[in-house]
Image: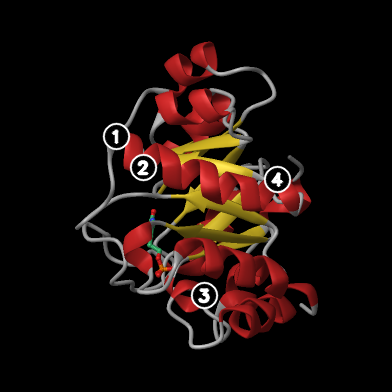
């Protein structure tokens, strides 16, 4: 994976859409997403074999379109399917354990909300940071209060040089603010997964990123 792959980082699990997840992913790819994270969490989330089966189906779509496939939190699943990356939160497995368990070519992303978390993640060798919530979001059940694009800008000013994606409440209207603050890309769930026209929604956000 490269930094460019993080530009329009779509995240979805089966409970982020009322449509077929494979169809939604295909449409999002046709609209121009540059990487995909499988995040099967929250109310009604699949587990066990059902989760594994869905992961494989979504990964197949990604592979056939050359879009990196990242797994949220579940290290066993990421290793079993040989995902391109794994993304963890602050309360999940420690970065040092993750780096020991994962192959060198597996991208490791971690969520960071504070300057201290960002610095620690960079020092411990994270490949990229997910910084948020940028804006208010109802998608993540336990989301904290928004920290705003200024927080991301402060991280850049304080010497955080690894790739950063902003996350939380990002859509066509505010994506540029996140890029202007120093992000390399934006992570989006509902603005794409819940759109009437998935492909068009992805394209609309991407335009704001590439014509900054
Ligand atoms: N993580 P939407 S906010 C998964 O702040 C996630 O770390 C966040 O969904 C964080 O694009 C969030 O629909 C939800 O707002 C993002």
- The location of residue 144, given as percent across then percent down, is 26, 59
Under circle 1, the secondary element is helix
Looking at the image, tell me whether mark 3 or mark 4 is earlier in sequence order: 4
Q: Please, which colouring scheme is shown?
A: secondary structure
Q: CA distance from mark 4 to mark 2?
A: 18 Å
For the residues labelled 2 and 1, say whether their Cβ atoms are less than 8 Å apart: yes
Task: Name the residue beneath numbered marker 2.
Answer: 51
Q: Is residue 65 left or right of residue 16?
A: right
**Badge 1 is on which residue?**
48
Tell me the SS state at disc 2: helix
CA distance for labels 3 and 1: 26 Å
Closer to the camera in the image, 209 or 23: 23
Q: Name the mark nearer the viewer: 3 or 2.
A: 2
Q: Is mark 3 within 8 Å of ligand 1?
A: no
Residue holding disc 3: 192
- Which type of secondary structure does the marked residue at label 3 adopt? helix
Classify mark 4: residues with Cα within 10 Å, few (<14), some (14-19) or many (20+).
Answer: few
Look at the numbered disc 4 and give the secondary structure of its residue: helix
Image-based side of 208 in relation to 82, left or right: right
Of badges 3 and 1, the one in the foreground is 1
Q: Residue at x 38, y 64 (%)?
A: 147
Q: Which residue is at a point 56% across and 25% down the rendered structure image?
A: 123
Return the disc, 4 or 2, that comes first in the chain's sequence. 2
Residue 133, x across and y down, in percent: 39, 62
Going by the image, does 64 lie left or right of 141? right
- Residue 63, disc: 4
């Amino acid at each position: 994976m490269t930094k460019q792959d993080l530009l329009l980082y779509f995240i979805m699990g089966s409970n982020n859409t009322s449509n077929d997840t494979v169809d939604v992913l295909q449409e999002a790819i046709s609209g121009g997403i540059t990487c995909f994270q499988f995040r099967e969490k929250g109310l009604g989330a699949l587990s066990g074999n059902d989760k594994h089966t869905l992961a494989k189906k979504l990964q197949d779509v990604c592979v056939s379109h050359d879009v990196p496939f990242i797994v949220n939190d579940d290290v066993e699943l990421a290793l079993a399917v040989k995902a391109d990356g794994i993304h963890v939160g602050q309360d999940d497995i420690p970065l040092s354990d993750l780096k020991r368990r994962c192959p060198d070519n597996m991208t490791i992303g971690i969520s960071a909300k504070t300057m201290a978390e960002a610095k620690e993640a960079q020092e411990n060798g994270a490949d990229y940071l997910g910084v948020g919530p940028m804006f208010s979001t109802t998608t993540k059940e336990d989301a904290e209060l928004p920290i705003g694009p200024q927080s991301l800008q402060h991280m850049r000013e304080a010497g955080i040089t690894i790739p950063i994606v902003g996350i939380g409440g990002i859509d066509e209207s505010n994506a540029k603010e996140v890029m202007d603050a120093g992000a390399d890309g934006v992570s989006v769930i509902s603005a794409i997964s819940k759109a009437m026209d998935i492909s068009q929604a992805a394209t609309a956000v991407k335009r704001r990123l590439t014509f900054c």
